Image (spheres, helix red, strand yellow):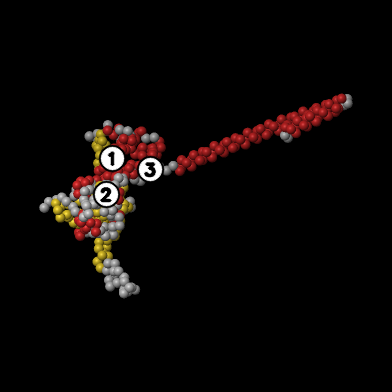
Amino acid sequence: MKLEEFNAKVAELKAEGAKLAQAGKLEEAEAKKKEIEALEASFQAEKEAQAEENAINKDTVVQANLQNEQKLGEENKMEKVYDASSVEYRNAFLKHISGRDDQMTKLENTAFIHTTQNTPNVLPTTMLNEIWDLVSKEHSIVGDVRTLKTGTIIEIVKHTAVAAGAAVKQTKANEGKAPADDEQNTFIKVTLSGNDFAKAVELSYAEAEMSIDALEQYLIQEIAKSLGDAIADDMVSTVKTGTAAANKTTTAAVGKVTYPEIAAAFAALKRAPKPVVYVTRFTLYNRLATLEDSAGRLIFQANANEGIEGYLLGAPVKIEDSVSDDEILIGDPSKVTNNVITDILVETDKDIKAHKYIYSGYERSECALIDDKAFALLTVKASA
């Protein structure tokens, strides 16, 4: 019963009781009074029952919400995947390699155990990316070549020559007829099984107590510098060795390069749509920067774009210190395939006699020039 109905009914009964009392019908008037009392008791009981029901319903809703929140939290916890990219693992890794395992939080310890259960020396993703970024900035050729992170030994096909039938032009006279010789390309298979590149860094126990962030940056810089130098040196050596003998020339004059010699090096390239010039700063500014064509125009055009020094006959010029001074390496880096078998990792050890931590950066990869005419090497003559 609603409150309005209850009040109206009580008012009606009271009015009837008053009339009966005025008429002298006292017993009947008393009966109305008892009827009002019974109505009030019934209404009060109904109110209490409704209040209890509301309380139960409210508690049920609250409990359901709490359960939902708990389930949601459990789902989020289950969805949290700890791997090399998680902040918890990065912190745990750096604490572990500096002898601070006891400083790991519960989440860091969980992340470390989960991530290293199959591969013990996993490098945090942020560190790995920063190392490769620094290597690519320090050695442009490493960032330019085609890199495959296969994690296994692979075979690739290398083009060495067109033995016969190279691209005969069809004319009206021989249209519809087969060329005298089918094009015959010479291919060989090259197995990229990998070379080991490693760099060891030593820190005393006291030095290793530097902050986590400082330790991270120190290792990134040291590993990037040393591994980058070794990887780039191997790449440049592989490219120079794999370049066709006809594409390797030496200048006529000692300590001097001419415009026709540069043009001839570019002309020797085959199947190299996007050539790049790799030189040291010594070679660039002592041999190429002031070089003029037959009309007296500079053939090197400086450019402020990040990553390149300028353009030489339309090709971007990049500094590469793994190329020797007085060498001009020109070619399409996409024709170099680099197979990474083991990505960069850091192994740790202790020298308990010298009280030092040893951090060894390691990477295994191998590259190959897949087209021997895609590069040319022009060497500035050193002596008469």
For the residue carrying disc 3, how many other residues have a C-alpha within 10 Å: few (<14), some (14-19), or many (20+)?
some
Percent position (x, y) of residue 170? Answer: 31, 70
For the residue carrying disc 1, how many other residues have a C-alpha within 10 Å: few (<14), some (14-19), or many (20+)?
some
* Residue position marked by numbered label 2 in the rendering: 301
Q: Which residue is found at the position 26% from the left and 60% from the top?
A: 270
Percent position (x, y) of residue 348? Answer: 28, 40
Residue 268, picture quadrant: bottom left
Mark 2 vs mark 1: which is more N-terminal?
A: 1
Percent position (x, y) of residue 327? Answer: 20, 51
Percent position (x, y) of residue 74? Answer: 48, 40
**Between 243 and 155, the one nearer to me in the picture:** 243
What separation in Å lies between label 2 and label 1 (alpha carbons)?
Answer: 32 Å
Mark 1 vs mark 3: which is more N-terminal?
A: 3
In this rendering, the label closer to the viewer, 2 or 1: 2
* Residue position marked by numbered label 3 in the rendering: 85
Q: Which residue is found at the position 22% from the left and 34% from the top?
A: 354
Amino acid on which the number 2 mark rests in the picture:
Gln
